[in-house]
């Protein structure tokens, strides 16, 4: 008799164990609706989208509630009106600053403000478009997510990870904003008139006051615009990071279930029957379908945020290039040195975080491969083989409109590109470097 086959009572006992295990893995847990709703994409992104409303780039109503069906975007509403005003204001800042940059001697130095406001205006315009699509997107994926989460043990650390990450990025961003304001207030850069608050606003928005006169109203308006712009500046990176955390958790839940199932089977490897083989086949088929659903949702999300991802990475790279070039300018005051170090470190750190979290998503999608390849022969079915092929052919990832895929390796690719372009900038801007070394800083505005 085959050594893998035991007596009939033993096989019946094994069948009862495996059926109990199958029901444990797949059976919905009662009274978990509230917890499940908190872990959907709608629940996880709620605080980030509220931040988007505060920064005037995501004018959607109803995102504070638990029901995504109550989300609304209204063309005629106060939130949309404020978002349009924000878009027009940041676009105006971009146009006026780029005009002054291109007519100045120190062009590279003055490109920081145009790039900054071009980035923010692009995010504001794109998010107005996303706001129109948001209800359809979130309601489409909500049902699939509820069905998935009912059959898996919830990741209780998911919301905590998301909230901690958002809080860290925003707090560091506000610290960097404070240092920027202190630099404008204390630095001797930019000749201007006025004192106190007026001097601060004139220094920061010198390209605007070439065309209009200062008064308290436009000064306060520009200060509010500056604060809202700081929050909006981080929105794209936070979307990439948050989406990566959510779907990394989803695929880790699938991997954890596979680990638990295979480890249980290894303890009963000597038990074999056709009915148990069917249980294995059912398990791999269900796991493969769950994986396919999550991969489809991830792909849908990647397509929705593809342009935002492309814009975010493009402007982060350009900021790093300009900041590296500007680092050649001598700095006399501590606040100027502190401003440069903080702004450069923040942009680099934010870009690295986006790439690392996106890389973790890609790795989580492929983490099941070595586990499935190592299962015992009697557990390896045709469905397991199909599952392996599916993971190899359709791993989850985020892309920038198919121009690039976010993995950990993209960090090295961006670094290599930055070094190449930076050498080109230095080679073709020797005259500007000489002016940095020979001209007093008081004539340099940024």
Image (tube, rainbow, N blue to C red):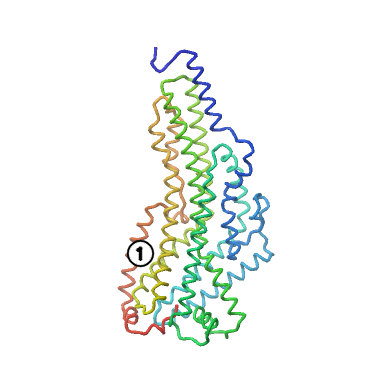
Q: Is residue 46 above or below residue 186?
A: above
Q: Residues within 10 Å of mark 1 (few under 14, many from 20)?
A: some
Residue 245 horizontal/vertical position (percent): 49, 50
The percent coordinates of residue 237 (x first, y second) are 48, 59
Q: Which image quadrant is residue 91 in? A: bottom right
Q: Residue at x 37, y 60 (%)?
A: 414
Image position of 430 (left or right of 260): left
As rendered, which of 37 and 240 lies closer to the eye? 37
According to the picture, the residue beneath numbered tag 1 turns out to be 418
Q: Is residue 32 shown left or right of residue 165?
A: right
Give percent across and percent down for residue 243: 51, 52
Q: Residue at x 53, y 87 (%)?
A: 194
Q: How many marks?
A: 1
Q: Quadrant of the N terminus?
A: top left
Give the image location of residue 276, x and y in percent: 48, 22
Local SS, label 1: helix
Q: Nearer the viewer, residue 176 or 79?
A: 176
Residue at left 58%, top 42%? 144
- Check the picture and name the quadrant holding the C terminus: bottom left
Q: Please, which residue is most extreme toward the bottom here?
A: 193
Q: Residue at x 35, y 61 (%)?
A: 415
Q: Farthest residue in the front direction?
A: 334
> 64 above or below 372?
below
């Amino acid at each position: 008799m085959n050594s893998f086959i035991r007596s009939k009572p033993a096989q019946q006992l094994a069948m009862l164990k495996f059926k109990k295990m199958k029901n444990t893995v797949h059976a919905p847990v009662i009274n978990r609706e509230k917890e499940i709703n908190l872990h959907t994409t709608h629940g996880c992104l709620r605080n980030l989208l509220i931040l988007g409303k505060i920064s005037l780039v995501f004018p959607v109503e109803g995102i504070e509630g638990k029901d995504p069906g109550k989300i609304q975007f209204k063309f005629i509403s106060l939130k949309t009106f404020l978002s349009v005003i924000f878009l027009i204001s940041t676009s105006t800042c971009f146009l006026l600053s780029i005009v002054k940059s291109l007519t100045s001697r120190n062009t590279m130095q003055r490109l920081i403000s145009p790039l900054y406001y071009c980035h923010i205006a692009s995010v504001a315009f794109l998010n107005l478009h996303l706001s129109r699509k948001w209800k359809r997107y979130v309601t489409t994926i909500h049902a699939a997510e509820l069905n998935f989460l009912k059959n898996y043990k919830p990741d209780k650390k998911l919301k905590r990870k998301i909230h901690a990450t958002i809080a860290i990025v925003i707090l560091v961003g506000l610290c960097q904003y404070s240092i920027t304001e202190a630099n404008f207030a204390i630095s001797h850069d930019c000749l201007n008139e006025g004192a106190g608050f007026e001097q601060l606003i004139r220094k920061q928005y010198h390209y605007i006051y070439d065309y209009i006169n200062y008064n308290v109203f436009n000064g306060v308006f520009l200060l509010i615009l500056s604060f809202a712009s700081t929050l909006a500046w981080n929105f794209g990176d936070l979307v990439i990071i948050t989406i990566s955390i959510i779907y990394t958790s989803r695929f880790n839940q699938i991997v954890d279930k596979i680990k638990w199932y295979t480890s249980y089977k290894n303890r009963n490897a000597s038990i074999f029957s056709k009915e148990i083989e069917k249980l294995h086949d059912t398990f791999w088929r269900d796991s493969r379908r769950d994986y396919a659903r999550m991969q489809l949702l991830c792909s849908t999300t990647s397509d929705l945020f593809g342009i935002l991802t492309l814009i975010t990475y493009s402007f982060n790279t350009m900021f790093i290039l300009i900041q590296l070039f500007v680092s050649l300018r001598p700095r006399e005051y501590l606040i100027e040195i502190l401003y440069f170090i903080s702004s450069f470190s923040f942009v680099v750190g934010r870009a690295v975080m986006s790439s690392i979290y996106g890389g973790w998503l890609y790795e989580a999608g492929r983490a099941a491969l070595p586990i499935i390849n190592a299962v015992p022969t009697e557990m390896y079915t045709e469905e397991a083989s199909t599952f392996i092929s599916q993971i190899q052919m359709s791993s989850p990832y985020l892309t920038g409109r198919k121009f690039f895929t976010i993995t950990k390796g993209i960090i090295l690719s961006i670094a290599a590109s930055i070094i190449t372009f930076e050498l080109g900038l230095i080679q073709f801007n020797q005259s500007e470097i000489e002016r940095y070394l020979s001209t007093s800083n008081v004539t340099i505005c940024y």
